[in-house]
Amino acid sequence: MHVLPNNNDTDVIHEFILLGFLCSQEVEILLFVLFSIIYILTLLGNSAIICAVWWNQQLHTPMYTLLSNFSFLEICYINSNVPNMLFNFLSKTKTISYNGCILQFYIFLSLCATELFFLALMAFDRYVAICHPLHYPTIMTRKICRTFVSACWVGGFLWLVTPATLISQVPFCGSNVIDHYLCDLGAMLAISCVPVPKIMLTCSIFSAVITFITLFYILVSYILVLRAVVQVPKGSSRKKAFSTCASHLIVVFLFYGSIMVMYVSPGAANQPGMQKFLTMFYSIATPLLNPLIYSLRNKEMKIALRKVMCKV
């Protein structure tokens, strides 16, 4: 799937060079070690949550089922960009094929969209559990939970079909150097042969719609949840509800904050350095922090994780 150049151009782009981080080879080796450690810790942390939920029968509830699926999503998410980045730290060419770049763009942002849907679903789960506890067993059955989880995955990958198709139609016929460590929207559009305002606008609209709709739903859900929690008499149940909601909200604000700057308003992050930092934050830092946030604020998860460590 190669894009034909304009009539005035003679070269067709068959591959891109991911510039990555502009630094010396010694610094790149240090970054390779640093990000390798982060990558391994992220895999271990999220895998531990999956194993804890899988092995502990008491955690076979919708909330923890969603959490384990969310951890699996984080593993997929970090695998969509970090291994290639680590390889490029040690590579002299740092090239990626045209098709490989479009595929990375599609998978990376599809997983990002899936995470937005998952965060909204987890907010819905907490809303039903706290605001309608008597109806919770009939609303969030295992079958319905599996249906919601499947819908998040399918919806996330379907949502990015149009943006990925549009990006594949952008004419690249001059420079093939992408000033980023992955094939991201702003960095790719920056090396287009001609301005593509319609494509940028369309991609921004797609990003804005899914971001603001899911964020609005999450905020409304937690406002209702917090209102219900405040009315509960002081005690362990109230403290537990506050702790669970706080964990979810921390993850929401960390993820949505960087996402909104990057994709809803690409011009606000038009500096390559800022693009790389924001992308690293929501695609590398948050998958590392999420297991810590959820496990440190959840008593049941702490106990389950200790059992996992004992088994290992």
Image: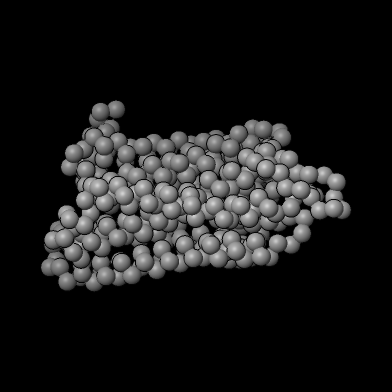
Identify the residue shown where x is 49% and y is 65%: 209
Looking at the image, can residue 7 be seen? yes
Kindly give the residue lying farthest to the top in the view shown.
312
On screen, residue 180 versus residue 112, left or right, reads right
Comparing 76 with 213, the one in front is 213
Identify the residue shown where x is 62% and y is 66%: 201
Comparing 43 with 170, the one in front is 170
The quarter of the displayed image where residue 71 is located: top left
Q: In the rendering, at what x and y percent does residue 184 appear?
A: 61, 51
The quarter of the displayed image where residue 25 is located: top right
Q: In the rendering, at what x and y percent does residue 35 appear?
A: 53, 39
Comparing 217 with 2, the one in front is 2
On screen, residue 169 versus residue 144, left or right, reads right
Q: In the rendering, at what x and y percent does residue 104 appear?
A: 58, 44
Figure quadrant of the N terminus: top right
The image shows residue 55, relative to residue 229, as above or below, that is above
Figure quadrant of the C terminus: top left
Identify the residue shown where x is 32% and y is 52%: 148
Q: In the rendering, at what x and y percent does residue 7 appear?
A: 85, 53
On screen, residue 58 versus residue 18, left or right, reads left
Identify the residue shown where x is 59% and y is 39%: 85
Looking at the image, can residue 292 be seen? no
